[in-house]
Amino acid sequence: MKSLCWIRRDLRLHDHAALSKALERGETSIVFIFDPHILDKLDDKEDKRLTFIIDSLKEMEETLQKKGSSIHILYGTPEEEIPLLAHELKVSYVFSNRDYEPYAKIRDQLVAKKLAALNIEFELFKDTVYYEKNEVLTNMGGTYKVFTPYKNKWLEKFESQGKIVPTYDCPLNGLIKFENKKNIIDFDWYKIIGFKEAPVLLPGGSKAAKKRLKTFADKIDDYKDARNYPAIDGTSQLSVHLRFGTISIRELVQESITHRSDGASTWLSELIWRDFYHMILDVHPEVEKVAFKPVYDNIKWPGTQAHFQAWCDGQTGFPIVDAAMRCFKQTGMMHNRLRMIVASFLCKILLVDWRKGEKYFAEKLLDYDLAANNGGWQWSSSSGCDAQPYFRIFNPYTQSEKFDAEGKFICIWCPELAKAKNKQIHHPDILLFPDYPKPIVSYDNNRIRCLEIYSVVKGS
Ligand SMILES: Cc1cc2nc3c(=O)[nH]c(=O)nc-3n(C[C@H](O)[C@H](O)[C@H](O)COP(=O)(O)OP(=O)(O)OC[C@H]3O[C@@H](n4cnc5c(N)ncnc54)[C@H](O)[C@@H]3O)c2cc1C
């Protein structure tokens, strides 16, 4: 029986649930589609994520060509393209890995319907997450809304399964052999899809992902502390690879359990946060549009467009915020501690609706993932499930003193402050540093205003 494996956010040829299943059934072809529903929403025609995707596909193609095969690359709407190709290739099955985003779920339903009309089966597999929504349930059989009990149940299940991490064999000899003139290496796909190649900041592909994992494995034991400091290379930096599936979540879980340290278990907790937010999006797709806790949608946000723009441009006069935002604008990357600081600052000090920040992150983050980004923003604005309490407001000055004490990170991105000493780096005197913007708001006053505007949620 012939099968077609449709790859989406899983750009690898190893430990791949859908590909493994397809190869098990018989001869297999692989397809990737550039989907205009997604691409048309990207304003930046040099989007770095496209380059990451294309580089990852090129690496896959090199491997496939050695086996005499290739990836079918298409541009068009999946609900049209997948049935056409499946029919043309005379396959009996189309296999993919499950995607929990609302758009993806609707897309997959449409594709399934069209394939069914052709008598072709469409099967989806768990691959993106370690455990799906129905696998980690409360004792009453419901889904969790609070992280710690979810994590405890996740770990309980993992231990009950002997901590044996499954892997999916992908023997590539079962691929259908064919020559493809429009392969991703030799054909100008950038032109077809209307984009340009962006400078590479983070190389795509599974080789780069494995290399990064190896580097991180040597310092995983220090993760518990090191992860908090933006000037230290203390985190895995694997989020982009996880986002596009150049490495599997199972490889990461396996790595975490081969180390017996607090650092490794803290890192596993972060991977569980990822599962948690995917589960939340799957069970509560409405969070894409509204606050998880509806009463938080009663907040009236007085923040101005000018303040939002100053935040985007790194011109707020709060050094840790500006350094983070300038770094982000240039690289598309941001350390987790900084994401928490700038997100809290936008909604609780600049009093701007968190959705504006969420959207800006979605446009620029290399590792943008709807579930994790929405979860992070709803946590920061306190509107999410298990979010920080609304009256907890990060103080950008003390956060800066604590997590970038010597101002190493700040100085890289705010060169105006390069000569600042001690506390000046965190809270500069505008007379001494006239080139650096003066604070656009007063932290103390806006902290009080924040508590006022959030008073509508009191008692909820
Ligand atoms: C406002 C805000 C927005 C965010 N947006 C995204 C996003 O779009 N995409 C994204 O992958 N992460 C997002 N995060 C979570 C986190 O900041 C990043 O996953 C992390 O900084 C990536 O760096 P790393 O790979 O070195 O992580 P590590 O510290 O090495 O963690 C390992 C992996 O665990 C996962 N992870 C870690 N922290 C979280 C978390 N809090 N929630 C969910 N998963 C987590 C990531 O996949 C990460 O790669 C956001 C956090 C906040 C506060």
Image (cartoon, grey):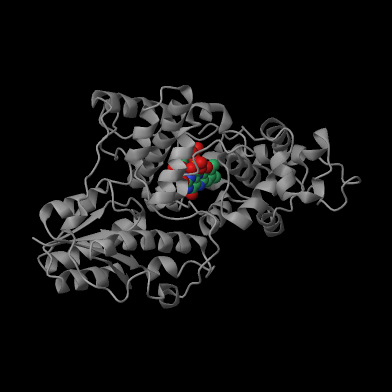
Give residue 394's quadrant in the image: top right
Q: Is residue 301 left or right of residue 21?
A: right
**Measured from the top left, where is residue 150 in percent x and y?**
36, 30
* Snapshot quadrant of residue 69: bottom left
Answer whether residue 292 is visible to the viewer in this image. Answer: no
Residue 451 image point, x, y percent: 66, 37
Q: Residue furthest front?
A: 66
On the rendered structure, is 444 left or right of 200? Answer: right
For the N terminus, which image quadrant? bottom left
Q: Residue lying furthest right in this view?
A: 431
Q: Residue at x 29, y 33 (%)?
A: 136
Query: Which residue occupies 24% across, 24% down?
Result: 160
Residue 155 makes an appearance in the image = yes
- Number of numbered discs visible in the structure rendering: 0
Residues 267 and 143: in front is 267
Q: In this picture, is 88 found above or below 250?
A: below
Residue found 83% across the figure and 36% down from its top: 421
The percent coordinates of residue 5 (x first, y second) are 22, 59
206 vs 62, nearest the viewer? 62
64 versus 333 height, above or below: below
Query: Relative to residue 3, is residue 374 drawn left or right?
Result: right
Q: Where is residue 267 in the image (x, y as percent from the top left)?
A: 45, 32
